[in-house]
Image: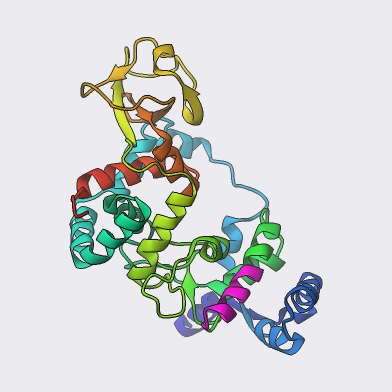
């Protein structure tokens, strides 16, 4: 009986499917054949046996489950930052990050010189994205992207484009598309690049003829390239905490898309003295259980949000980077 139950669970989670009869797949194959000169026989073979990825499909389903009244009580609106940072910046991750910086010290030094990106910010991104390569994802990228491209979900158009990029990448970079594992969204490697970002920003830093984001050398340079191309300003500040009156902040609109001249922000000033940044600032609010933390964020903070469109993500990167700060360049 136990064996039967386990087999049923396995079948539910991993369902093998021939997508060659799917209308979307047929159209996709025609597009790849016409626009990119792929052989129909090769593509039909790829799609003949796809493991449908139930978990990613559920995450990107067309409808989002509403929280129950009990969940709203259990998880109140305040304290979101406490819950987020608890798992992103830990003593263990800081220790791992310092080891990673030392291990690849030479690469970080070369990359910092060439791209102008501080080593600790690159290392912080790798730490948060994949725990320095310890967790690059367990989902087969080809099957995940195929599932999300051809099954109904709210981002199927996006994943169809990413699937095309991934297939083209596998040919260009000479890897088997069926062998690569990644995140539930199809992100790849230590830096968790989506295929489109892999193609646009990937760097063959060790000059071995291919971009491999499963290895530190190319990943470190590729993240630096991503940040530089998105507008990182060498030598400038990222963020600093500020003070304000009260425990909850509602006086001005906050978020990484807001910009203010500092003189416009009455009653707000850096908590730790002078802050040498003279461009417009963003106001970033971090909701803690008992009060809101408020920060000035500079252009470089905004650049980090281009990697992941979340102010909490960018702040976690910044705070981890500060704890990893090692002047190795």
Magenta residues, dominant SS class: helix
The answer to whether residue 232 of the structure is visible from this angle is yes
Give me the residue at 47% from left, 44% from top.
231
Residue 35: image quadrant is bottom right
- Where residue 296 appears, as percent x and y from the top left, is 36, 27
Give me the residue at 44% from left, 12% from top.
264
- Where residue 327 appears, as percent x and y from the top left, is 18, 50
Give me the residue at 33% from left, 69% from top.
216
- Where residue 140 appears, as percent x and y from the top left, is 52, 75
How many badges with numbers are in the image? 0
- Where residue 82 appears, as percent x and y from the top left, is 32, 38
The answer to whether residue 52 of the structure is visible from this angle is no
Horizontal side, residue 69 vs residue 45: left or right: left
Q: Is residue 35 or residue 208 the one in the foreground?
A: 208
Residue farthest top in this picture: 266
Does 189 appear above or below 251?
A: below
Q: Is residue 181 or residue 41 the one in the foreground?
A: 41
For the C terminus, the image quarter is bottom left
Does 185 appear above or below 236?
A: below
Does 229 appear above or below 81?
A: below
Does 199 appear above or below 233?
A: below
Q: Which residues are magenta?
A: 163-175
Give me the residue at 39% from left, 41% from top.
233
Give the image's coloring scheme. rainbow
Residue 240: image quadrant is top left
Magenta stretch contains residue 268: no
Magenta stretch contains residue 171: yes
């Amino acid at each position: 009986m136990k064996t039967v139950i386990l087999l049923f669970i396995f079948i539910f989670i991993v369902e093998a499917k021939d997508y060659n009869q799917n209308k979307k797949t047929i159209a996709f194959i025609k597009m790849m054949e016409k626009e990119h000169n792929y052989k129909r026989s090769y593509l039909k073979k790829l799609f003949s046996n796809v493991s449908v990825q139930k978990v990613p499909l559920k995450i990107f389903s067309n409808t989002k489950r509403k929280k129950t009244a009990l969940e709203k009580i259990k998880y109140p609106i305040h304290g979101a930052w406490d819950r987020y940072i608890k798992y992103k910046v830990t003593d263990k991750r800081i220790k791992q990050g310092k080891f990673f910086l030392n291990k690849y010290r030479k690469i970080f030094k070369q990359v910092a010189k060439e791209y102008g990106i501080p080593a600790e910010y690159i290392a912080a991104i790798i730490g948060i994205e994949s725990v320095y390569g310890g967790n690059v994802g367990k989902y087969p990228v080809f099957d995940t992207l195929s599932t999300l491209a051809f099954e109904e979900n709210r981002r199927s158009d996006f994943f169809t484009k990413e699937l095309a990029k991934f297939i083209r990448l596998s040919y260009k970079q000479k890897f088997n598309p069926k062998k690569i594992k990644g995140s539930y969204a199809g992100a790849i490697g230590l830096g968790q690049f989506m295929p489109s970002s892999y193609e646009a920003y990937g760097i063959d830093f060790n000059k071995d003829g291919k971009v491999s984001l499963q290895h530190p050398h190319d990943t470190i340079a590729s993240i630096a390239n991503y940040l530089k191309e998105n507008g990182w300003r060498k030598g400038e500040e990222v963020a600093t905490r500020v003070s304000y009156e009260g425990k909850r902040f509602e006086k001005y609109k906050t978020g990484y898309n807001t910009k203010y001249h500092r003189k416009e922000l009455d009653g707000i000033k850096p908590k730790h003295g002078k802050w040498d940044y003279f461009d417009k600032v963003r106001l970033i609010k971090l909701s803690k259980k008992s009060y809101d933390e408020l920060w000035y964020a500079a252009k470089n903070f905004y650049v980090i949000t281009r990697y992941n469109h979340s102010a909490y993500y960018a702040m976690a990167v910044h705070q981890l980077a500060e704890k990893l700060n090692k002047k190795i360049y």
